Amino acid sequence: MTLTLRQMRYFEALAREKHFGRAAETVHISQPALSAQILDMEQGLGVRLVERNRGGILLTRQGEEVLAQVRSVLEQVERLESGVRSNGRMLDGPVRIGIIPTVAPYLVPKLVPCLRERYASIEIELKEAVTDRLILDLQDGTLDAVIAALPIEGDGTEAFPLFVDRFFMAMANNAEAILMSPLSETQVDVDRLLLLEEGHCLRDQALSVCGTVGKRSLVTFGATSMTTLLQMVSHDMGMTLIPEMAIPTETARNDIRIVPFAEPAPSREIGLIWRKSSGRRDEMKALAEAVASCAPTPR
């Protein structure tokens, strides 16, 4: 039996998701159909690729070896398809972009129409997730580029800086505590600092900005979005760090006061990250320029 590209894509999805149901969803087929294709693949190769259990799957030793070769083949196929598809045209066809949650809601409304205006044939696919998840998807080949805070440590990746996003402190308009403006990091009451849940880079940035005040109890509500966190702030449950690009949207829907930091104000650098091995440097540079041009205008 000849091994097919379809089977390789199904196997790669299963290895990535570690679960038949989730893998079937990502490749848009039924779970029984995916299971049948993997079984055919195992029979054709004459080896057992996965250990099946109630919780999901584990790759066998042979499965790990096959996976490395499968990913190499799929990467080569992607480069071939991309070259044929573009035929000398930039960003022609599908472009799969991952964006972190503290950037996506404020960038996407401007990004999508901007890209469609510049590149009429582009097919934009977006995914919102935390940085670590997006970088794994980028390295696996399921994303073409990631928009996230720099620096990023990832094997075989390169980054183009997009823009600098300054940080401010958000607090309730009716807050009992009064912060002096401009604010210094030492004025931040870390006992009232609200944080996003573990895994969000903005959590780490907040701790870095306010880390000079020493160890105190930090309030983590497990919030997964800036919007949820700022709703808590508007009810005077605490204060939180807010990126500049989020201010116009969030001040319009939340009763909050924005306090600037003293210069040099803390900030984050947002960049576009891509795989060096994809052979699409010129396209990724064009994408980065387009993203930078339609980024939210600083206040």
Image: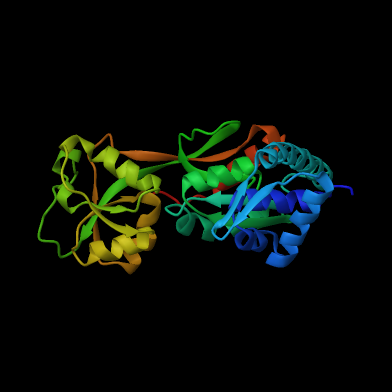
Percent coordinates x, y for residue 98 in the rendering: 56, 50
Picture residue at 15% right of the left edge, 44% below the top: 216
Query: Vertically, is 146 above or below 127?
Result: above
Picture residue at 10% right of the left edge, 61% below the top: 176
Colour convention of the picture:
rainbow
Horizontal arrangement in the rendering, residue 163 relative to residue 14 (left or right): left
Q: Is residue 299 visible?
A: no
Horizontal arrangement in the rendering, residue 122 relative to residue 43 (left or right): left
Query: Vertically, is 146 above or below 214?
Result: below
Q: Residue 27 appears in which quarter of the rendering?
A: bottom right
Q: Nearer the viewer, residue 56 or 270?
A: 56
Percent coordinates x, y for residue 86 in the rendering: 79, 45
Percent coordinates x, y for residue 78 in the rendering: 76, 43
Q: Is residue 15 visible?
A: yes
Horizontal arrangement in the rendering, residue 243 relative to residue 90 (left or right): left
Horizontal arrangement in the rendering, residue 68 relative to residue 18 (left or right): right
Q: Nearer the viewer, residue 170 or 96?
A: 96
Percent coordinates x, y for residue 71 in the rendering: 71, 40
Q: Residue 171 appears in which quarter of the rendering?
A: bottom left
